Amino acid sequence: MGREKAVPMQQNIRITSHVTIVLTLLTALTALLLAGFMWLASAKVDDLALIRQKGYVEQGLDEQVKAVQHELESVTVWNDAVLLVARDDHPWIAENIGTWMHKYFSHDRTYVFNERDELAFAMRDGEDIAALTFLDDEKAASAVRESVRAVLHKRIAPGDSNPPVLAEIFAEKILSIAGRPAVVSARPIVPSSDEVLLEAGKEFIAVAVRFLDASAVEKIARYARLETLHFTTDAAESTAAIPVMATAGQTLGYMAWNPIRPGLMLIEQIAPVGIAGIIVAMGVVIFLGLGLRKTTLDLSESRLALMRHRDQLEESVRLRTAEIERQREELDRLLAQERHVNALQRQFVTMASHEFRTPLAIIDAAAQRLSRTKTNQKPEYVEEKSAQIRSAVLRMVDLMESILSAGRLETGKTTLKPERLSLAEIIEACCARQMDVRKSHTIHRDLSHLPQAILADRTTIEQVFTNLLSNAVKYAPHAPDIHIRTSTKNGMSYVSIQDAGIGMDAEDLPKLFQPYYRARSATGIAGTGIGLNLVKQIVDLHGGSISVESVLGRGTTFTVALPNKGPLANLIKRAA
Amino acid sequence: MITVLCIDDEADIRQLIVEELADAGFATLEAANGQEGLEAILAYWPDIVICDISMPVMDGHQLLAEIQMNHAELFNIPFILLSALTDKDNVLTGLRAGAADYLTKPIDFDLLLAKLAGCIARLENDRAVGRAL
């Protein structure tokens, strides 16, 4: 039972483990999905933010570039400027064009060319260059000045139906000056109203240079709210960068910055909380799984206990039923035995009556004969009749003794009085008596192998041999020879009494010593059925044994074994 | 002379009965059991049979049954059962099997002789009627 009971428990544990694993996996998967989604969202947000940042930087750059010519406009479209540059008023020019531009618009360099394209004024980083020299920017400044001059020339050329407005003429270039990106812008200095007339071909041209890697960067950074913005020629330096393109098309460098990643920042901020949350969730799942496992185990345990209890109950019911059945069978058996004993006892009473009546009949008949033949009484005749009477009386006495002994044995009132006696003498006496009673049989006896004396109870031992001899005679009506053989071995005396009579079926032998039992072959031969039972009980009381061999129709041999040293000898031997 | 067969396994009883019958003027035959009794009946055709019941080899009841079944010609020989068995079962069994009478032991010789006399009277009457026919 044990093995079959263990299986559901293992199954339960397996199911519980399975559930726990599935729950854990589901939780982990959910956490993974959530994390993945978060990462995706943050990456998307970061991308969007980067695009926005790029837009701001591009726009900032664009505004910075465009601002240069607008700022230049503020000092070139001006009546005073036309008049005063023509007069070559150096202090005024330095004050109102050079310093102004540097101070308020952060222009790095300012040049003014006269109508003959000669340098009339130069200022670099707020410093008035009196020597009127270029540094490394002559080519660039000349290029934009040439462009403006070309437009101005075109204006005065004939056939131009749609001349450009003076105030709107400008030229601008983004290029590299000594490796630095710069916006170079040129405008003619023109009157702001009709009050001042400027002759065509007499225009002065102002050129502004603004580097894009210095103050412009700071402005863009402020505009785009990117503190780390800077100019670099190395594009790989940073992930976020936009190119600074020259007007000619080549890349001068990059506006680069450490991109602001709001998604990443968000993740960095919520990651600890998220991880803690996942750990807690896992913990809860595992805790719940363990709880489930414990509950399942308890359930299995209680179910097993229930099954065990049920089995025990079934077992006890089964045992109880078997016990009741056994008791019933025992009662039936006892009842049958009781009935059998009753039947045997009734039979015994009938047979006992018969057995008494037979010698009585002899006595009575002999007595009648004596009284009837008064006239003719020879002494031999009287002798013969009295012998018959006496033999019949002996039979009756033996019978009575047997019945009384049986009664005593049955009630346990028999006490043996062991004495030293000669077994040979007793057997001899029994033989003589038997031959007296039944003259038809001859008892051949060899008693020489018996010990001188054994310790035994005389009265009962006499009954043993009387019974056995009378049986031998009674059940061998046509075989007149009876043999008694003796031997001594291992402290026991053996006496076997053999007849060649009717014998018995093997089936009768085991029951032969039961009270009132009579072999089936004894039908028709009177007997009480108490003799052999009596014999066995007496022999047993003496610590001896009796055995029987018999062949139906061929005769029977009873062998009695008696301990030489008396009833206690065997008991003592057994106890040792 | 009337011949009586006495069947009994007890030699003493047999002897005493035979003595008494001989004194009373009967011719006697003896048998020690039913088997010997049947052989004697077939051999000597006794006029009357006195038969014990408890005997080895073949008892009184068996002998009567045997005669009833296999020897119808012997059926009119009167059987007087003489047994130490006094219970009603045995008496009824014996009488139903055709016994003329059932006497119990110890034996009252006067009673036995009176029963024999009755049987003889009936026998002689039968024979007289038989001769007359």
Image: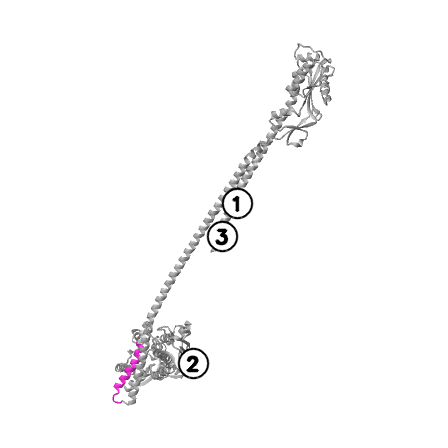
Quadrant assignment for the C terminus of chain A: bottom left
Q: Nearer the viewer, mark 2 or mark 3?
A: 2
Image location of residue B79, percent across then percent down? 31, 79
Residue A111: quadrant of the picture:
top right
Q: Is residue A460 above or below residue A73?
A: below
Name the kind of residue labelled 3 in the image. Val
Residue A364 shown in magenta: yes
Q: Are marks 2 and 3 on the same chain?
A: yes
> Residue A167 versus residue B120: which sits nearer the camera?
A167
Question: Does label 1 or label 2 sit earlier along the sequence?
Answer: 1
The chain letter under disc 2 is A
Within 10 Å of disc 3 (Cα), the crowding (few <14, some 14-19, many 20+) is: few
Image location of residue B83, percent across then percent down? 31, 78
Question: Does label 2 or label 3 sit earlier along the sequence?
Answer: 3
Q: Give the label on residue A487, or none.
A: 2
Within 10 Å of disc 1 (Cα), the crowding (few <14, some 14-19, many 20+) is: some
Image location of residue B95, percent across then percent down? 30, 76
Q: Which residue is mark 3?
A: A7
> Residue B96 versus residue A128: which sits nearer the camera?
A128
Q: Which residue is mark 1?
A: A21
Image location of residue A117, percent across then percent down? 74, 16
Name the kind of residue labelled 1 in the image. Ile
Q: Nearer the viewer, mark 1 or mark 3?
A: 1
Report if the CB atoms under discs 1 and 3 are less than 8 Å apart: no
Report if the CB atoms under discs 2 and 3 are less than 8 Å apart: no
The chain letter under disc 3 is A
Q: Which residues are magenta?
A: A353-376
Q: How is the image coloured?
A: one colour
Q: Is residue B79 visible?
A: no
Residue A385: quadrant of the picture:
bottom left
Report if the CB atoms under discs 1 and 2 are less than 8 Å apart: no
**Under tag 1, what secondary structure?**
helix
